[in-house]
Image (cartoon, rainbow, N blue to C red):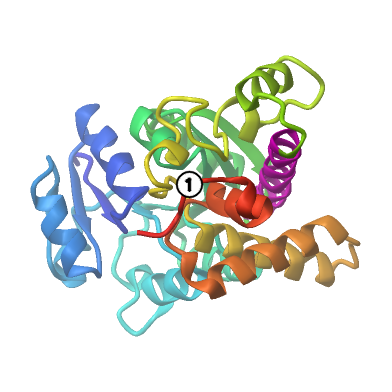
Amino acid sequence: MSELIAFIGIGNMGSPMAENLVKAGKKVRAFDISKKIIEQAKEKNLDIVENLDDLITNEVTTVITMLPEGKNSKEVYLGDNGIINKVSKNCLLIDCSTIDIKTSIEIGKKASEKGIKMIDAPVSGGVMGAQKATLNIMVGGTKESFDLALPLLKIMGKNIFHAGDLGSGNGAKICNNMSLGITMIAASESLMLAKRLNIDIKKVHEIMKNASGNSWPISVYPPLPGLIDGAPSNNNYRPGFSAGMMNKDLKLAIESAKEVNANTPLGSKANDIYNKFCEEGHSNKDFSAISKVVGGDAWDYEIDD
């Protein structure tokens, strides 16, 4: 049987991931609940269906989902019209959504009960990583399922990690993103201090890139314009990874920490800062725009549309 990939969720991240599969010669059929996204996808090299019922057929050998929240994944997989009841036992399920660990395990358990292999495989690297196929992909599931998925994951990402059993991918992802949220705020505070001290920002940035204060927000994804080409900060903070998504991931991390009695004071504070930022109407800005909150009137740029 020829390979057919059903891809559900073709927004900012899902669309370039699906496109990379097509570029690699894979047959991909895609769907999104958003009519606007469907219209945009039709302009790209993607085979689009406008109804989920038309997407999942006996021909489908792999389902890949990239959805915003756990409730979305649960509905797509386990709902009244859930795909677990439609795919064959030979179909491999890959959920690239970043969701809570309990939901991830619940979906995987239901799939296993039907003899269907499934992995959770959330990604890190933002839209730039999705476009360039340099994503970091963190996988939870059996070694057999991981090995089956690996050829497809290598098309979409650069660094593929088998974190452990089902749910471990999402566990690793929220640990990573809690650190990322904290370090983005830290990078913003450091550059703001340099500004207040009347030290050239570009020089401080270059020093930090080569010194012990380096981090991903400093070296790859800076929170201020004019430091690294291609960063969202140079494009009015058009999201590679939105503040709303960071806020969601920080909440997942804090909830998981409470469940296992882990003390995360910096993670909790970062969650408070991002939550306030989103409540002020900036959910759709890139998460690096938090620099404006940290810097206040130290910066002469705006983040509003």
Asked if the magenta segment contains residue 244, the reply would be no
The residue under the point 72% across, 42% down is 183
Read off the magenta span: 169-195
Q: Is residue 33 above or below residue 181?
A: below
Identify which residue, 190 or 255, lies in the foreground.
190
In the image, taking residue 42 as reference, residue 3 lies left or right, namely: right
Element under disc 1: loop
Q: Give x and y (percent) for residue 65.
A: 38, 56
In the image, taking residue 263 as reference, residue 235 lies left or right, namely: left
Asked if the magenta segment contains residue 193, the reply would be yes
The residue under the point 64% across, 47% down is 298
Which secondary structure type mostly characterizes the magenta part of the structure?
A: helix
Q: Quadrant of the N terminus?
A: top left
The residue under the point 21% across, 29% down is 23
Q: Give x and y (percent) for residue 81.
A: 30, 80
Identify which residue, 229 or 128, lies in the foreground.
229
Task: Tell me the amino acid under the disc marked 1.
Answer: Tyr
Numbered disc total: 1
Q: Is residue 42 above or below residue 304?
A: above
Q: Quadrant of residue 270?
A: bottom right
Q: Is residue 257 visible?
A: yes
Q: Quadrant of residue 305?
A: bottom left
Disc 1 marks which residue?
A: 301
Identify which residue, 158 or 168, lies in the foreground.
158
In the image, taking residue 172 as reference, residue 80 lies left or right, namely: left
Q: Give x and y (percent) for residue 165.
A: 67, 50
The residue under the point 83% across, 71% down is 258
